Image (cartoon, grey):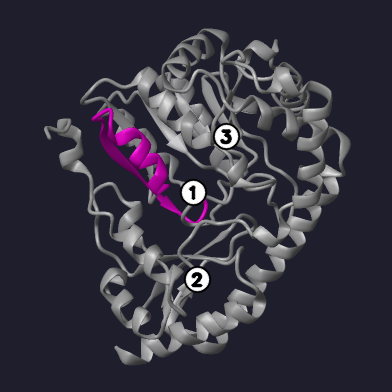
Amino acid sequence: MKYASWTNDLRQSFLGEILKTASYTETISFAGGLPAQELFPNQELKECFNQVFEEDGPIALQYAEARGYEPLRQWIYDRINTRSKLKTTSEIIITTGSQQGLSLVAQTFLDPGDIVLVESPTYLGALQAFQGYRPRFVMVPCDEEGIIPEELAEILTKCQPKYLYVIPNYQNPTGRQLSLARRLEIIEIARRFNLLILEDNPYGELRFEGEALPDLRDLYENVIYLGSFSKILSPGLRVGFLVADQKTVSYIERAKEGVDLFSNNLTQRAVYKYITSRNFKEHILKLRKVYCERRDTMLQAFKDYLGSDVQVETPKGGLFIWAKILKTKDSLEFLNYAQAEKVIYVPGTFFYPDGRRSNEMRINYSCSSPEVIEEGIKRLGRAVERI
C-alpha cells in the first residue's frame, strides 16, 4: 500500500512496545500517564448513565450538534467565566478528549512547513497530533519555572510561528508550573508579536498546594484553551472542550464535523449529570489528597534508594515527576538496566521533537499504590547500581 508521505516521519512505536511488555509481566510501570482507576466514581457514573437513559434515552442515542450538549457547555462557561471574559457559550465546543482538540487546532491552522513553537520538552501526544500536518517544530528553552521569556522573544525575532503550544499547569512531562511572573512576561511578548497561544490545561484541577494561578486565557485574548474531564473523572469518557473566539470555533466545528460529527452525546449528558448532581468538588479534593500522598511517597523513595544518583523536580500538582539519573547520559539506554530489574519509565527522548538523547525520564506516580511506588523506585535504585 502507498501511505501518505508524513508517515515516513513517524518514530518506531518503541514506547508502545514498552507498555505492552509491562502489561503481561511482573514489571512495575511508571510509564503511563494514567489517573488512578480505583478513584474513578464508577457507581455514581453508572447511576448518571442510567438516569440519562431513563429521562432522555432516545434523544441521547440520536445524532447531535457538533458543538456539544448545550447544558454542559453552559456549565463550562459558568465555571471558567469566573476568570475569563467569555461572551457566549458559542465560544465553547465539546471535543472527544482534549487530544482531539489538539488535532483539530492543527487541522484548522497548519499548512505544511508552518512553524509551531513548543516547550522543550513537551507532551508527546501533542507532537503526534501536530505531526500529520507537517509543521516545523521549534523548541523554546525552559527551566523549572517553565518557558524562559527571553528565549521566546529571541525566537520570535527570527520566525513567524502559527502558534505557541504550552501546558502551564503541572506540565507533561516535567510536572512544572509556569510561574505567575513568567505568565505575565510571556503574555507581554505575545502581545508584542501578535502570537497565538494554544493553552492545554488537563491537569489544572490537580493542585496540591498554593492558589490557582490565572490561565493564560485570563490574561490575553489571543488564546485557544483546551480542557478535559479525563484526569478528573475518567479518560474512558473521552470528553474535553475547546474555548476560543466565535470565528475560530466555527472553523473548528467544521473540521470536527468531518472527523466524527459530534462527541458522544450519551456520555456528555452523563458527565453533565455527574458534575451537577453529585459532589464533584469533594471528588476533586480526594484526587488531590491521594495524588499528593503518592507524590510524596515517590520523592521520599528517590531519596532513600537513589540519593545523590538522581536529581528530581518536585511538582506542585499533576501526575508526573521529572528525574535525571546522574550516572548515565542516556535514559533510553539505561532503560535496559531498569527493565532487567522489572521497572519501566518513559525516557526523555520521546518528549523532544528532535529526539535528542538525555539522562531525563518521566515517572508517573498517580496510578500506583504507595507500596508499589516504593518497590518500583527500589528497583530503579538497583538498576543504577548495575551501571
Assess disc 3: are there few (<14), some (14-19) or many (≥20) residues with their C-alpha within 10 Å of its C-alpha. some
Q: Which amino acid does label 2 sit on?
A: Val
Start-end of magenta stretch: 123-145
| Residue 13 drawn above or below residue 50 | below
Q: What residue type is labelled 3?
A: Leu
- Give the camera-side residue of 7 and 60: 60
Instruction: Name the residue tied to disc 2.
Output: 312
| Residue 58 drawn above or below residue 189 | above
User: Is residue 33 one of those drawn in magenta?
Assistant: no
Q: Which residue is drawn at 85% across and 50% down?
A: 282
Q: Are marks 2 and 3 in contact (CB under 8 Å)?
A: no
Residue 133, horizontal then vertical, whole percent: 28, 28
Q: Residue at x 57, y 34 (%)?
A: 184
Question: Does dot 2 land on a helix, a strand or a loop?
Answer: strand
Instruction: Name the residue tied to disc 3.
Output: 184
| Residue 4 drawn above or below residue 294 | above
Residue 230, horizontal then vertical, whole percent: 61, 44
Q: Residue at x 22, y 24 (%)?
A: 112
Nearer the observer, disc 1 or disc 3?
1
Question: In what quadrant of the picture does the C terminus appear?
Answer: bottom left
> Which label sits on residue 241?
none
Q: What residue type is labelled 1?
A: Gly
Image quadrant where residue 208 sits: bottom right
**Mark nearer the N terminus (1 vs 3):** 1
User: Is residue 144 one of those drawn in magenta?
Assistant: yes
Instruction: Name the residue tied to disc 1.
Output: 146
Q: How many marks?
A: 3
Question: Does dot 3 land on a helix, a strand or a loop?
Answer: helix
**Mark nearer the N terminus (2 vs 3):** 3
**Mark nearer the N terminus (2 vs 1):** 1
Q: How far apart are marks 2 and 1 (CA)?
A: 15 Å
User: Quick check: 159 left or right of 241?
Assistant: left
